[in-house]
Image: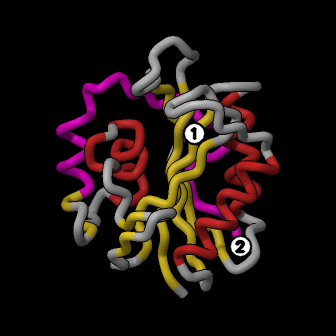
Amino acid sequence: MTLAYVALGSNLEQPQQQVRAALAALGHLDGATLLRHSSLYRTAPVGYADQPDFINAVALLDTELPPLRLLDALLALEQRFGRQRSFRNAPRVLDLDLLYYDGVFLEEPRLILPHPRMRERAFVMVPLAEIAAGATLPGVGDIAALAADLAGSGVARLDDESNPNKQEQA
């Protein structure tokens, strides 16, 4: 099995509920097990600013799927949630990004690993640091240090009483 980090985001159709439902769906993904996930965070949009704030989280999966098959499973889940790709950085019901896949470096037209912009994005690094603070990811760096550098970038943790320890019960 292989560890993979996935970023989740939504800013349409009750985004908190969308992200929670997507986390539950990741827990039932064939070929993968949801090990834990971060709290939910409210973040300002990046790129296209004229849209609602996002709700973001990061999940850790243990998967037997190779990277491109995991990507396909994530894209299929986005479609199930009604994701439409109208333009870059557009509002969306659900966005799932494969951030990191257990030390794999990959540059394909459909997928670059580690995610090329993750270290620049507070909405990724802050929730990632919550569940992987002690980790140093090859090609990315020290998670806690990167998150600390970005922490003042408009990311606010939401109260998440439904998930006090961020770990899935087996």
Q: Mark number for residue 86?
A: none
Instruction: Report the residue marked by disc 2.
Output: 170
Where is the C terminus found, in terms of image quarters?
A: bottom right
Answer with the quarter of the image where residue 94 lies: top right
- Magenta region includes residue 38: no
| Extreme residue in the front direction | 109
Vertical placement of 57 versus 100: above or below? above
Q: Where are the magenta residues, as a range?
A: 143-170
What is the crowding at mark 1: few (fewer than 14 residues within 10 Å), some, or many (at least 20)? Answer: many
| Identity of the residue drawn at 20% across and 59% down | 142
Instruction: Report the residue marked by disc 1.
Output: 9
- Magenta region includes residue 147: yes
Residue 58 shown left or right of residue 124 in the figure: right
| Residue closest to the eye, 35 or 21 | 21
What is the crowding at mark 2: few (fewer than 14 residues within 10 Å), some, or many (at least 20)? Answer: few
Residue 6 shown left or right of residue 107 in the figure: right
| Identity of the residue drawn at 34% across and 78% down | 103
Image coords of residue 89 (percent x, y): 50, 31
Image coords of residue 39 (percent x, y): 53, 42
